[in-house]
Amino acid sequence: MADILLPTNTIVHPDKDRFLHEENPFEAMMARFDRAAELLDLEPGIYKVLRNPEKTIIVSIPVMMDSGEVEVFTGIRCIYNTSRGPAKGGIRFDKNVSLDEVKALAAWMTWKCAVVNIPFGGAKGGVICDPLQMSIGELERVTRRYTTGIIATLGPDSDVPAPDVNTNERVMAWLMDTYSMRVGHTVNAVTTGKPVAMGGSLGRREATGRGCMITTREALTHLGMSMKGATVVVQGFGNVGSIAAELMQDEGCKVVAISDRTGGWYSPKGIDVKHAIKYVEENKTLEGYNVGEPVSNEAILELECDVLVPAALENVITTKNASRIKAKVVCEGANGPTSAGADTILDEKGIFVIPDILANAGGVTVSYFEWVQNRGGYYWSEQVVNERLKEIMVNSFAEVLKLSRLHRVNMRTASYMLSISRVSMVHKLRGIYA
Ligand code: NAD
């Protein structure tokens, strides 16, 4: 903590946030940024720099569909900040992708890499499309043309993508191959989250969910609670949610409800998570799972439980439903699941929130390990990956908790203060290039 200069004994009264436009993720991110910047007494020049992305690229992606018709999709890549290292951030394929969403996610990546102190900046990308309605061939053509469109920014030293919602190892393999073909040799460090056979890291697929489990365990310990018998509700049973649920169950938690885009299932006796994962592998979704009783994606958030893990999309906990959240701990597996206004309500209710930029930072941490392994050409065992991940997550949680107690702010504000101070310090040292 020696590298961070912070004012002490500051109490925040963030009521103004209740009046923000909750639907806009960039504004929600900025509300948190502004509050932390104020507490840090951030220099006006650095404040202005950090409120703007460095670069945003928007590309048209013409694709020959299987029907023989040409469709034109829109792709975005936002490089938010590269002061601490190459831009790092996932690529999302979704029909609801928007410029503001991509910008917010890119900023979050900047703060996330800084909060766990890995030497990356932040970026995010997205293609506005409905991948669930597309064939494998169509997805491959979208990926390759999008990669070509943003190729000027990509590179192991400049911009390193990863999977996000509706993209996976296979998409990263196409991206890496397209980039490698263009530069004339194999460059596996241009992306992370690749298949292990082509330079992916062991433990990467589970890393985000594992980070959620570790930070939840730390939070419960801090609150004098135990993983053994703690009841858990998970909204979003994809990569992050299903693995977080599985690992929490392995630690003795009782997972009482899970959901995906098709709806959810609630069983007070507990759900066998491994069985549910197998069901989704075989059936693609939880539709028809029929274990316990059905529960909607709205109602699942309001169930009685110890730990709530929103692990689907942003803005699901807002001023409209925050007062009905009953969990003792909210572990934000997703990026931006809670609006700025809802933060205040959760605080008033005494709910301990593990903020997204800390809770789900396990993924980018192991992405960093993957990039290091690719560049070193030397690969680690899964045990080494998991041990190093645990060390970073436990230490980062402790640093944020320490700051939150020191300044009497919630974990979210403390995590922003920690990361913004790290990013701004590098800006100060580097100066403004003219
Ligand atoms: P994924 O595509 O594997 O899973 C998303 C899940 O959410 C699916 O089960 C889907 O059915 C469900 N879902 C979609 N819309 C929903 C809705 N309206 N209500 C309920 N469920 C819904 O994606 P993922 O990689 O697990 O990412 C989930 C979240 O975690 C995103 O916010 C992502 O940005 C964030 N995240 C992911 C990683 C990672 O390593 N994958 C890292 C950090 C953060």
Image: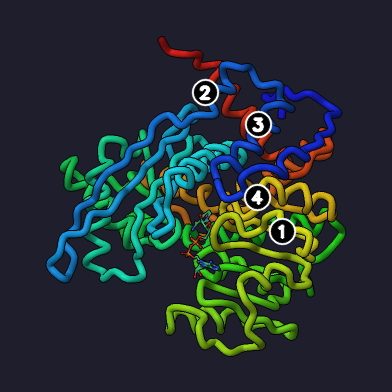
* Mark 3–mark 1 distance (CA, rounded to whole Å): 23 Å
Label 1 and label 4: CA atoms lie apart by 13 Å
Q: Which residue in the structure is indicated by mark 1?
A: 330
Residue depicted at x 68% and y 45%: 340
Q: Separation of disc 2 and disc 3 at Cα?
A: 13 Å
Residue at image x 78%, y 23%?
7
Label 2: state its secondary structure.
Answer: helix
Point out the tag, 2 or 3, that comes first from the N-terminus.
3
Answer with left or right where residue 222 lies relative to residue 208: right
Tag 1 secondary structure? strand
How many residues crowd around disc 1 within 10 Å: few (fewer than 14), some, or many (20 or more)? many
Task: Say which label, 1 or 4, has the lower sequence index.
Answer: 1
Give the residue number, with chain letter if any, for mark 2.
Answer: 49
Quadrant of the image for the N terminus?
top right
Q: Quadrant of the C terminus?
A: top left
Q: How is the image coloured?
A: rainbow
Q: Which residue is mark 3?
A: 34
Which is more foreground, mark 3 or mark 1? 3
